Amino acid sequence: MNSELTVAVHCLLYLDSREERMANSEQIACSVATHPARVRKVLSLLRRHDLVTTKEGAHGGYQLKAELSQVSLGDLYRIFAQGSLRPSWCSGSEHSSCNISSNIPAVMNQIYGGAEQQVELYFNRLSLSEVKRLLRESEQGKGEDSMSLENQEVWLFYTGSYAESGEPGIHLCELRRSTGEMRVLHGFSGLTNPSFVALDAMGLRLYAVSEQSEGRVAGFAVDPGDGKLTLLSGDKATLGADPCHLALQPGPERHLLVANYSSGHVNAYALESDGAPGDMTSLIRHEGSSVNKERQESAHAHSAVPSLDGRFAFVSDLGTDQIVIYRLECGQFVKHGTTNLPPGAGPRHFVIHPSERFAYGMNELNNTMTAYALDPEEGRLEVIQHASSLPDDFQGENYPADIHFSPDGRFVYGSNRGHDSIVRFHIDPATGRLEDPAWASAGGSWPRNFAVLDDYVLVANQYSGNVAALRRDPENGRLTPTEQSLKLAKPSCIEPLSASLAAGMLK
């Protein structure tokens, strides 16, 4: 990307930070560590587009004229960097005897032109005030991993639940690390059955399904000061039944992916500039069935998980015993492949290992966890192993549910509803195989969902109506039940805030 664009962003943000929003070119050049002549060239173009003005005299300089909220990265991109993705080609003239060589310039420029269009659309949604916020959050989070501040005493997490629209269904809660004690800080009502919630990468937008026969999805702004939620632009219909899972596509396209269990639909939404779910860009309905006549009479999309680079989506279909793999192309699901599981497995939740070499899934109907080999470039999955989620001596009814890694990626955990336990497996780093299973009580009945922190696992026990705190040994990954439990009606999901954002809220 053209570096002049970066200098232009710096100039405007630097002027905004100054008293009277003014500085001379030497001051700006010093702050950005570049030559004043280069800064003056950039400022000249900014002035031409009425973003800055000049003030003459001994105390003069360049003065910011525009408001940051009114200037988008797209505006600056069109001034400084449009066309920078298209290089000059010298691979052959149109009269060349090699058709490949002579056609490369036109074809590659077409490809780069399409890429630039996507970059510009993304930049249009980012105002400079948003860039300023991102920089501030980045500064707060330097050197911190997601939930691993060693000295932080209090951690924060959101919970989703099954609740009527007039009842609080999403709660912000705190965990006191020294004791495991928990309490509710805030509650949000207005959404029916917000059974699954997910935060964006910055932790400042929360998304929730509304799990009902006419499904809906909603987005919320998270107040960085106290974690309270504000609904963004109302909720959106999913055109499917009982949405039960959602996830945000990484990368510049920024789509929200939703899985609808009862109808077998998966859909995608573009996001508005404020992060609210916007237009639905794709709607796919799975077809098929499998051997369990009660639970697999039709397709049941149970989760839609994007690849770490945002190019693919892996949809676990409990009804067809398949992981259906899609390419994500401009918000569209494009069928890419399938990975079949044993008949009656019932794949439910799915996670991709940070190494991107492996992936793991929880199977609801045959009490197994599956390890997969993953090819992230080609978007392919191959089954490595099916491991029982239960101890050999358990004979009762059980339905596995959720799955998560430890922060260091050495262990993977799964929840068992019926056995009411959390199983821990060690991951062989060379082969991806699951080893050395160990079980701990979930601290309640029907552990639908859980979250793994450094030295705790928090479990949402739906039937017993509580969130249980289990101690976790980071060295061996083993869990120990505690006496600590938080009463909540029908909790179904736990989403931790990043340590840096939580620290800001607790100041």
Image (cartoon, rainbow, N blue to C red):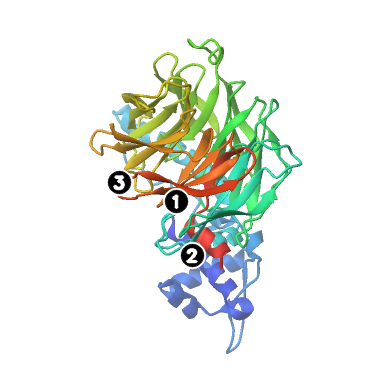
- Labels 2 & 1 near each other (Cβ < 8 A): no
Q: Position of residue 44 (x, y in %)?
A: 55, 69
Q: Which quadrant of the rendered structure holds the C terminus?
A: bottom right
The nearer-to-camera label among 2 and 1 is 2
In this rendering, does residue 125 appear at all? no
Residue nearest the observer in this picture, 417 or 197: 417
Q: Position of residue 483 (x, y in %)?
A: 49, 49
Q: Residues within 10 Å of mark 2 (few under 14, many from 20)?
A: some
The nearer-to-camera label among 2 and 3 is 3
Q: Residues within 10 Å of mark 3 (few under 14, many from 20)?
A: few
Q: Amino acid at mark 1?
A: Ser
Residue nearest the observer in this picture, 84 or 120: 120
| Whole-number angstrom distance, CA of label 2 to CA of label 1 | 32 Å
Q: Position of residue 221 (x, y in %)?
A: 64, 52
Mark 3 or 1, nearer chain start? 1
Residue 84's disc is: 1
Find the residue positioned furthest to the left: 430
Residue 140's disc is: 2
| Whole-number angstrom distance, CA of label 3 to CA of label 1 | 50 Å
Kindly indicate the quadrant of the structure image that contains residue 350: top left
Mark 2 or 1, nearer chain start? 1
**Which residue in the protein does label 3 denote?**
476
Mark 2 or 3, nearer chain start? 2
Q: Secondary structure at mark 2?
A: helix
Please report the residue visible at 51 percent of the width from the left and 45 percent of the height from the top: 468
Q: Secondary structure at mark 1?
A: loop
The nearer-to-camera label among 3 and 1 is 3
In this rendering, does residue 132 appear at all? yes
Please report the residue visible at 59 percent of the width from the left and 45 percent of the height from the top: 159
Residue nearest the observer in this picture, 233 or 466: 466
Q: Amino acid at mark 2?
A: Gln
